[in-house]
Amino acid sequence: MSNSVNKSFDLIAAFNLFKSYSQKRQHAKANFIAELIGCQIFVGSKSIVTYEVRVTKRYHKRTVTAVLDDMNYKIVSFHYQSNYSLADNRKHTYTIITFTPAEGY
C-alpha cells in the first residue's frame, strides 16, 4: 500500500458533480465546478490540484468549500482579486484559490 496522495483532478467525478448540482438547481456550485473543469481542460495533462487557480467570478468561500469538500479536497488559500477597466470605469473581481487533497484520500 502506497502512502502517496493522488494529486490529479478527477474530471469524471467533477462532471458527475456538475450534473448533480445542476439537477438540484444549485447554480453557484454548478458554475464553480464548471469553471474548475474548464481550468483543468485548459492546462491539459498537468493537474490544477496544488496550484493557484483563478476563476472568472466572485464565489462565496462557503460555496467553494462545499464543492471542494464534495470532491475530497481542502482549501489551502482563498482570496479575491479585482481588476479595474479604465475604458469603461468598471471593476471585475475574480476568486483565486489553491487546494489540495483532503487528508486520508
Image (cartoon, helix red, strand yellow):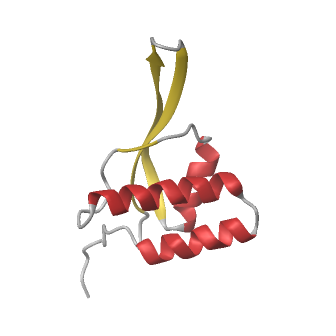
Quadrant of residue 16 in the image? Answer: bottom right
The image shows residue 84, relative to residue 55, as above or below, that is: above
Q: Quadrant of the N terminus?
A: bottom left
Q: Is residue 86 left or right of residue 50?
A: right
* Residue ID at (41%, 66%): 103
Rendering coords of residue 2 (x, y %): 24, 82
Q: The C terminus lies in which quarter of the figure?
A: bottom left
Residue at the far right in the pictured view: 25
* Residue placed most toward the observer, 80 or 1: 80
Furthest-front residue in this view: 87
One can see residue 49 in this view: no
Q: Could you tell me if residue 11 is visible in this image?
A: yes
* Residue 85 on image: x %, y %: 46, 17
**Residue at the spot x=76%, y=67% of the render?**
24
Residue, x 45% and y 57% (percent of image)? 36
Left or right: residue 104 versus residue 15 is left
Counting from the top left corner in percent of width and height, residue 101 is at 39, 63
Q: Residue at x 33, y 45 (%)?
A: 52
- Above/below status of 75 relative to 96: below
